[in-house]
Image (tube, rainbow, N blue to C red):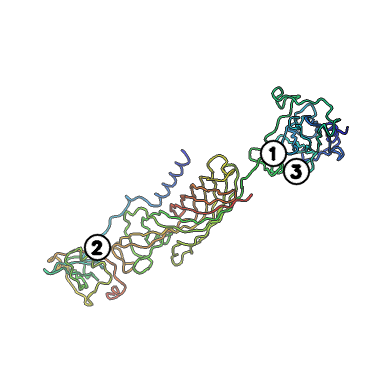
């Protein structure tokens, strides 16, 4: 009979491992060596595979997980070994070993209290192997009266009963997880289809509301970012307007192209940065004033609605808050009434006339808004966003509509 | 105060602050007969109104003042029509300047129908 005492061998392997500093996680998980000759074993069908592990006392072990793969089954399963003094023990249930001959593979990983893997013995690529033989081939291995415990009488996890199956493997980082899984924000390994990094390309059109009060006076044109031009000859308006009860004027702003990067920080929270270039809608600059700066920068925080919306494709809505810097030219039509009693400052101004006017608002702004992205797949999502922003110190209230695409990368 | 109310409050105050208060507006001064650049429609004949424009005023601001005016070759039937004509920039003006005493307008009905600051050429003629 070549059946090897797995428990003893593992215990030997653990106990003969060279001591390692448990408080040095930067060095990575500790490898608990087992002699290569002890990496295989044999046994009969319908017999549990006992596992016993002596964990070095300097290891701050919190959970010891046994990962095993049955013959003919694709996925790896996980059991948590229970502690008995200095040892961690458990067994692959005999009901799972079943009556099929083949090979069982397993390895062990030890987690600390935070879920990090601090030691392991065997790996998924180089596991321990237990050959299971049918009585017809190896009657000697099946002579023992090993008996499967009745699951109804023996709940998993109790002493003497099969180990409890672990459905969620604790972790602290992606390297703690295997099989293509990554470490989730809840501290457990999971199949993660989320894309944490997103690149975006958007086209934006804005419209604004500005104060029209005295907008086209020379003082406001020189100091407040307004520029007014007469319709009939295109000349800069330099007249003497009467301040009447103009309120607010609305007009188009710029069309921009925006390129952004967004990082998913938590299930429902992301931070994004956008840079933009205004390619249409900018107003003229008065002689002697600074030229229009078409570039923009913006930082955004988004709260995504729903439960873990990045875990699956589909519609994802969000609310956003942003702050940035940009010049926003708002085009509008200004009505002015000339003061007939004032000394002339410009010829040819009618008593009342309408002017083509712009206000260069900015350069800072804060924004709130809402939007949605429809994830066709995990990596691709067309998006739409509506936002309202207030510029300062040169004020305007802007509404912007963005249409774009988002590309997700791991 | 909820964040939404705080935001709306900020938005309103900033926007209204920039716009000042509409109750603070000044009265709208209107052009008069002796406002340089005023268009004046005068009921001089039974056929139609005459349309003049004040180019300059000589005097001390009383009825003895003399008005330098140009007369346009149009014949509006109403003051509204005269006002509409005055707003046209291609209005044919007489090259002759008419001098009228201010008391002339005491004898006729008249109304200032529009105003436009004089062109540089018109101003240059009286420098």
- x, y (%) of residue B61? 21, 65
Q: In this view, does B119 lie above or below A111?
A: below
- Whichever of labels 1 and 3 marks the residue nearer the N terminus, that label is 3
Where does label 2 land, which residue? B31
How far across and down, in percent of the image, does residue A184 sit? 65, 40
Pair 1/3: label in front: 1
Q: Which residue lies furthest to the bottom in this view?
A: B95
Looking at this view, name the residue that lies furthest to the front: A136
Q: Mark 1 lies on which chain?
A: A
Q: Position of residue A251 (x, y in %)?
A: 40, 57
Q: Quadrant of the C terminus of chain B?
A: bottom left
Q: Is mark 2 on a helix, strand or loop?
A: loop
Question: In the rendered structure, the residue with mark 2 lies on which chain?
Answer: B
Residue A281 at x, y = what percent? 45, 61
Q: How crowded is mark 1: few (under 14 residues within 10 Å), some or many (20 or more)?
A: many
Q: Label 1, label 3: how many angstroms apart (C-alpha)?
A: 15 Å
Tag nearer the camera, 3 or 2: 3
The crowd level at tag 2 (other Cα within 10 Å; few <14, some 14-19, many 20+) is many
Residue sitting nearer the eye, B22 or A23: A23
Element type at marker 1?
A: loop
């Amino acid at each position: 009979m070549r059946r090897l005492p797995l428990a003893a061998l593992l215990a030997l392997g653990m106990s003969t491992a060279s001591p390692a500093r448990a408080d040095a996680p930067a060095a990575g998980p500790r490898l608990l060596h087992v002699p290569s000759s002890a990496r295989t074993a044999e046994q009969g069908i319908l017999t549990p595979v006992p596992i016993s592990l002596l964990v070095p006392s300097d290891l701050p072990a919190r959970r010891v997980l046994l990962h095993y793969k049955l013959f003919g089954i694709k996925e790896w399963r996980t059991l948590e070994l229970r502690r008995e003094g200095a040892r961690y023990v458990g067994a692959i249930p005999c009901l799972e070993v079943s009556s099929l001959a083949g090979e069982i593979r397993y390895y062990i990983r030890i987690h600390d209290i935070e879920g990090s893997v601090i030691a392991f013995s065997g790996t998924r690529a180089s596991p321990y192997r237990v050959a299971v033989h049918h009585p017809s081939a190896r009657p000697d291995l099946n002579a023992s009266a090993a008996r499967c415990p009745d699951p109804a009488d023996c709940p998993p996890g109790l002493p003497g009963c099969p180990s409890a199956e672990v459905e969620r493997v604790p972790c602290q980082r992606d390297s703690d997880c295997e099989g293509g899984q990554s470490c989730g924000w809840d501290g457990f390994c999971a199949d993660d289809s989320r894309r944490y990094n997103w690149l975006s390309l958007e086209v934006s059109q804005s419209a604004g509301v500005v104060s029209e009060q005295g907008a086209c006076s020379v003082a406001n044109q020189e100091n407040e970012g307004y520029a007014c031009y007469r319709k009939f000859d295109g000349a800069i308006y330099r007249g003497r307007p009467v301040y009447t009860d103009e309120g607010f004027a609305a007009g188009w702003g710029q069309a921009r192209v925006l390129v952004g990067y967004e990082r998913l920080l938590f299930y429902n929270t992301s931070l994004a940065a956008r840079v933009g270039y205004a390619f249409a809608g900018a107003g003229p600059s008065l002689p002697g004033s600074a030229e229009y700066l078409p570039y923009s920068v913006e930082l955004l925080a988004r709260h995504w609605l729903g439960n873990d919306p990045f875990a699956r494709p589909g519609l994802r809505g969000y609310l956003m808050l942003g702050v940035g810097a940009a010049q926003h030219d708002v085009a509008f039509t200004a009505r002015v009434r000339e003061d007939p009693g004032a000394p002339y400052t410009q010829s040819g101004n009618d008593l009342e006339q309408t002017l083509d006017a712009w206000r260069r608002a900015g350069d800072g702004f804060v924004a709130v808004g809402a939007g949605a992205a429809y994830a066709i797949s995990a990596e691709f999502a067309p998006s739409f966003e509506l936002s309202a922003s207030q510029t300062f110190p040169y004020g305007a209230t802007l509404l912007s509509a963005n249409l774009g695409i988002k590309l997700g990368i791991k | 105060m909820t964040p939404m109310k705080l935001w709306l409050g900020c938005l309103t105050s900033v926007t209204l602050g920039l716009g000042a208060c509409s109750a603070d507006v000044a009265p709208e001064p209107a052009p008069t007969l002796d406002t340089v650049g005023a268009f004046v429609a005068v009921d001089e004949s039974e056929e139609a109104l005459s349309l003049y424009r004040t180019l300059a005023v000589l005097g001390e601001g009383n009825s003895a003042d003399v008005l330098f005016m140009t007369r346009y070759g149009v014949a509006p039937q109403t003051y509204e029509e005269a006002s509409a004509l005055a707003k046209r920039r291609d209005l044919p003006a007489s090259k002759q300047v008419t001098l009228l005493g201010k008391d002339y307008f005491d004898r006729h009905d008249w109304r200032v129908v529009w105003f436009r600051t004089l062109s540089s050429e018109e101003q240059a003629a009286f420098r």
